[in-house]
């Protein structure tokens, strides 16, 4: 029989053993996990700090993940922009107005090069990274740009650029081939030049510089514009009439007609006749010939440039513009193409908001960057448009008018792809996106420092000192062993044994 006093003492020792075993289990767990506690409650008064620090750390890690994705996209975008700049340089090299050597298909080697560069440009504008098409604005899941074949040659019932270019040339040239200007003689001694209506096509009368004596010029005036020249007597040989014409692309061309003696007429000249009436008739005929020549050459090149703007300038929700015809030669207006009758070369988001704002990322507390882009932004569109315009025409060997028209068009596209003042440049887009990338990199560096600091603070609160835990564990083990011995002695003790 165990002494009651011994039983009482033994129960106290047992409780101490249980507490020691629990303490050892806790220490063993700390030694295994390296953490003071598996719950915040076990951290005592520092648990609120731990929770707050971990919340901050999670937020910075979220920012870091966002920055990593943005940097991937911006890196690829930067590579595309760098190559597009190279494409523009190569394109300018192909647009030499002085080299006119036709290949078998009626195009020059420069045009063939430009066509290949156009295909490469369109492919790059369809670039994708991290689940997002980089030049599609907000519509990130689909390719923003059509194929080169569809854009140039159309698809099914949908017209491409080449068809629109041909229709635009008809509208600019008119039925008589004088660029939609009418030449008439309301009186025998009078010549009238008039625009054939109020519309955006053909040649427009700018100004008239009259150097002919014995003549009276009235105008240009009115809408549509017109001017008259009346011969009151004969002008002198060598005297000139200069008419400044506005071409469809906004550039100008001067037509100069020189009075010449009998039998000395020809290109740019009109013969002084036997009477004022005959001289007026000669001027009308020479003016008709000059306008037809302008229509074949300068107007043809300017019409192609205007067609390029019609078809490709679709920013801010616009649609490709088409000639409101047939008939096209007498058309008086443009109309918006529809997706059923016209290839929309750009198919991405086409809102009126800034292109950069179509993709945003929050990279820090209160800091959001914008890094979106649209393929129909001016800098991209200028390159695509001029490559298409330059590469699309065909010419005839031995035709001087064709050679002159090619040279003028090459000069126009060369100037345009040089990005003159006032035109958005690829470098501007690169600079804007570069600023966003720099902000993301700076934020990433800040987050790295902050995350490291927070992790150190969290470790100070949550991590166990393994050396201290080992010492405590040995101490607890020693105490536990002593308790086991004491318990054993107590349970073996009795009054009989004592006596």
Image: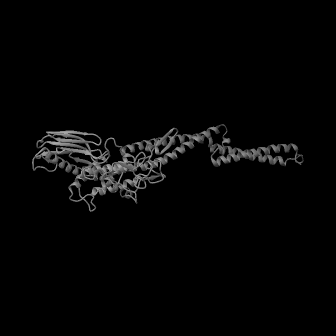
- Tell me how the rendering is colored: one colour
- Residue 384 picture location, percent across and down: 35, 51
How many numbered discs sit on the rendered protein? 0
Horizontally, residue 301 falls left or right of residue 486, namely left
Comparing 391 with 456, the one in front is: 391
**In this picture, is 360 found above or below 129?**
above
Q: Residue furthest front?
A: 187
Query: Which residue is pictured at 77% across the width and 43% down the height?
Result: 16
- Residue 381 picture location, percent across and down: 37, 49
Q: Which quarter of the picture shows residue 250? A: top left
**In this picture, is 236 found above or below 94?**
above
Q: Which quarter of the picture shows residue 42? A: top right
Comparing 360 with 486, the one in front is: 360
- Tell me if residue 84 can be seen: no
- Residue 197 picture location, percent across and down: 30, 46
Horizontally, residue 46 falls left or right of residue 197, namely right
Query: Which residue is pictured at 11% across the width and 42% down the height?
Result: 236
- Residue 466 picture location, percent across and down: 63, 45
Q: Residue furthest bottom?
A: 104
Comparing 194 with 322, the one in front is: 194
Comparing 109 with 247, the one in front is: 247
Horizontally, residue 374 falls left or right of residue 219, namely right
- Tell me if residue 71 can be seen: yes
Q: Which quarter of the picture shows residue 393? A: bottom left
């Amino acid at each position: 029989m165990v002494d009651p006093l011994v039983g009482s003492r033994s129960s106290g020792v047992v409780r101490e053993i249980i507490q020691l075993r629990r303490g050892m289990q806790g220490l063993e767990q700390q030694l295994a996990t390296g953490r003071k506690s598996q719950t915040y409650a076990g951290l005592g008064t520092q648990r609120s700090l731990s929770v707050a620090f971990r919340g901050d750390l999670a937020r910075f890690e979220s920012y870091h993940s966002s920055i990593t994705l943005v940097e991937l996209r911006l890196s690829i975008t930067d590579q595309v922009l760098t190559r597009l700049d190279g494409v523009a340089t190569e394109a300018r090299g192909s647009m030499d107005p002085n080299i006119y050597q036709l290949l078998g298909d009626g195009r020059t080697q420069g045009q063939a090069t430009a066509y290949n560069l156009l295909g490469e440009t369109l492919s790059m504008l369809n670039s994708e990274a991290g689940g997002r098409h980089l030049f599609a604005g907000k519509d990130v899941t689909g390719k923003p740009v059509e194929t080169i074949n569809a854009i140039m040659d159309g698809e099914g019932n949908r017209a491409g650029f080449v068809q629109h270019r041909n229709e635009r040339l008809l509208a600019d040239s008119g039925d008589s081939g004088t660029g939609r200007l009418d030449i008439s003689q309301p009186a025998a001694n009078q010549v009238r030049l008039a625009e054939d209506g109020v519309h955006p096509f053909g040649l427009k009368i700018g100004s008239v510089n009259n150097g002919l004596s014995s003549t009276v010029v009235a105008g240009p005036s009115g809408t549509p514009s017109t001017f008259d020249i009346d011969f009151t007597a004969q002008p002198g040989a060598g005297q000139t009439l200069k008419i400044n014409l506005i071409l469809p692309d906004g550039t100008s061309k001067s037509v100069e007609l020189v009075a010449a003696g009998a039998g000395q007429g020809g290109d740019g000249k009109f013969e002084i006749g036997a009477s004022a009436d005959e001289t007026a008739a000669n001027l009308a005929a020479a003016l008709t010939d000059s306008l037809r020549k302008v229509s074949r050459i300068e107007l043809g090149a300017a019409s192609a440039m205007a067609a390029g703007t019609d078809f490709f300038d679709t920013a801010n929700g616009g649609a490709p513009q088409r000639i409101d015809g047939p008939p096209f030669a007498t058309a008086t207006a443009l109309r918006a193409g529809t997706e059923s009758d016209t290839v929309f070369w750009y198919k991405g988001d086409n809102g009126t908001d800034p292109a950069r704002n179509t993709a945003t990322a929050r990279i820090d507390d209160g800091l959001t960057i914008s890094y979106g882009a649209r393929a129909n932004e001016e800098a991209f569109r200028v390159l695509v448009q001029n490559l298409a315009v330059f590469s699309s025409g065909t010419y005839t060997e031995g035709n001087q008018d064709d050679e002159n028209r090619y040279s003028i068009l090459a000069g126009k596209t060369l100037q345009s792809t040089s990005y003159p003042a006032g035109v958005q440049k690829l470098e501007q887009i690169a600079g804007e996106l570069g600023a966003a990338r720099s902000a993301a990199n700076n934020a990433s560096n800040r987050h790295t420092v902050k995350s490291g600091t927070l992790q150190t603070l969290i470790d100070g609160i949550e991590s166990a000192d393994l050396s201290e835990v080992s010492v405590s564990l040995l101490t607890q083990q020693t105490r536990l062993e002593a308790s086991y011995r004491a318990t054993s002695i107590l349970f073996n003790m009795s009054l009989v044994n004592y006596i």
